[in-house]
Amino acid sequence: MAEQVDVVVIGMGPGGEHVAGGLAEAGLAVVGVEAELVGGECPYWACVPSKMMIRAGNLLAEARRIPGMAGSARVDADWAPVAARIRDEATDDWDDRVAADRFTGKGGRLVRGRGRLAGPGKVAVGDEVFEARRGIVIATGSKPQIPPVPGLDAVPYWTNRDAIAAKEPPRSLLVLGGGAIGVELSQVYARFGTRVTVVEAMDGLIPAEEPEAGELLAGVLRAEGLTLRTGTRAERVRHDGDAFVLELADGSELTGDQLLVATGRRADFSGLGLDTAGLDPSVRTLPTDGRMRVAPGLWALGDVTGHGAFTHVAMYEADIVLREILGREGPDADYRALPRVTFTDPEVGAVGLTEKQARDKGLRVRTGLSKVPDSARGWIHKAGNEGLVKLVADAERGVLVGATAVGPMGGEVMYGLAVAVQAEVPVTTLRHMIYAYPTFHRGAEDALRDLGA
Ligand SMILES: Cc1cc2nc3c(=O)[nH]c(=O)nc-3n(C[C@H](O)[C@H](O)[C@H](O)COP(=O)(O)OP(=O)(O)OC[C@H]3O[C@@H](n4cnc5c(N)ncnc54)[C@H](O)[C@@H]3O)c2cc1C
Ligand SMILES: NC(=O)c1ccc[n+]([C@@H]2O[C@H](COP(=O)([O-])OP(=O)(O)OC[C@H]3O[C@@H](n4cnc5c(N)ncnc54)[C@H](O)[C@@H]3O)[C@@H](O)[C@H]2O)c1
């Protein structure tokens, strides 16, 4: 016999927890199903602990900038407080009691186990079956995508989980993939003394972003002592007992004490029973409409939707699902001003379309660029001032469709540009407003001038 409830949420990551908690607070009978830890990837193995690592790495880097600027400093890097902070403050030693209590405290019912669709409106978890009167939400997130490199399946490589939980930094680290995870974690480990080599298949780092951002970041990382091998793939991997060996396409070999595989993430729909709800189980992402509906009474949110594997996307989509199930008014999902921040030093903040994406859409594109060291604030800042602002405008409509802000606090500088993209503020209006002196965001004014606004 199926137990009657209002809503079942499968997967209690940041998106699932947000929607399930909100529905429970509104008085609905909600079951949240979680196979691992309530809170999902973000607080235990991703955003939160990685940003703690980055904060620590940035402190070391700032201290190393003191000579020539403010005297002298002796910097002895120590991973122990970083590992302790991740264990004690971020993850409670990978225990989700606080998050589970938060949900049940709102009136939700937590069911531990792997949920699967069991026909329209039904979810099974082990032997228990729930029938959801109002609907089901799929928020099962993503897993590392492991490339089919010969030998990789036979070696004890790291994923983000091992890199986050490491008790000490390895002497040397090979990183497969120069995307967001690859560059963030590579820089941190290098700053703690690890010899890091990044192998990226595309021609530049963070290839989903503007090439100028990837080039600038590559220059910074090389100057910090990292080895970067872009435009090449690993042909074979082996582990000889002591070290990992990556054979590259050009015949050269790289060795490292650890190997981090950071070549993207993808949803895993195996065992989720999508076919029982009349859906294609072989899809890569779940197609949703503007209200996050996959089918009548079935919603999806977060990494499974493919709109951007970010916590802020999962939370944004969760808000829409929440409104939808509670019958509240609100706009459809709108991804025109999707923001991303890669938390390297310098940070890479970006919003909307890159120049290439805008051109591929057939827009009449104009771009503007300014460099942080050429600005008053950048010149004052000196050590660690690498950065740029790049603007992408739709010349037809006279509005920005994308922007990138690399530099100290690049993610924060990007925010004003995100408002401009979202609200379609005319570039002439942006050009004739006042920018506080001497801020980093004045780089946007310089880039607007370069754009010819
Ligand atoms: C190293 C790293 C750093 C990152 N840094 C950032 C960052 O700084 N900023 C940012 O915005 N994003 C960041 N991300 C991305 C972010 O972590 C994800 O986009 C976010 O966690 C997605 O949330 P979600 O709710 O969709 O899924 P997830 O967090 O993946 O949670 C899904 C949950 O569903 C559970 N689950 C799966 N299948 C089932 C099932 N059948 N039954 C029951 N439970 C199931 C899983 O156990 C998991 O707990 C980072 C990712 C990584 C790996
Ligand atoms: N600051 C943040 O918001 C943040 C940080 C980390 C991760 N994330 C999210 O998590 C997602 C996953 O991160 P990720 O870095 O694994 O993925 P990614 O897609 O950002 O980067 C993966 C990189 O690996 C490269 N690659 C793929 N196969 C390869 C191969 N065989 N050899 C060499 N290179 C190869 C790709 O060209 C790409 O540049 C990100 O896309 C992002 O959405 C966000």
Image (tube, helix red, strand yellow):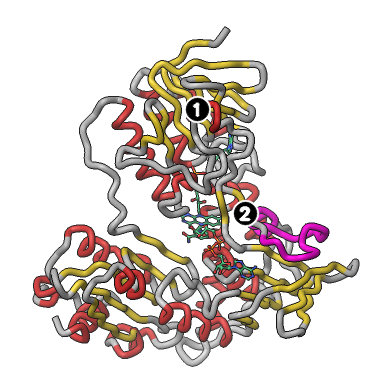
| Residue 28 visible (yes or no) | yes
Q: Write down the residue under mark 2.
A: 144
Q: Position of residue 47 (x, y in %)?
A: 52, 54
Picture quadrant of residue 150: bottom right
Question: Which residue is painted at 62% across and 54% down in the image?
Answer: 144
Range of magenta residues: 147-165
Element at label 2: strand
Q: Nearer the viewer, residue 406 or 204?
A: 204
Furthest toward the bottom, the residue is: 68
Q: Position of residue 125 (x, y in %)?
A: 62, 23
Q: Ligand 2 closer than 8 Å to the CB at disc 2?
A: yes
Furthest toward the right, the residue is: 241
Q: Nearer the viewer, residue 170 or 419?
A: 419
Quarter of the image that includes the C terminus = bottom left
Q: Is residue 75 left or right of residue 293?
A: right
Q: Write down the residue under mark 1.
A: 277
Q: Position of residue 79 (x, y in %)?
A: 68, 65
- Mark 1–mark 2 Cα distance, whole angstroms, equals 26 Å
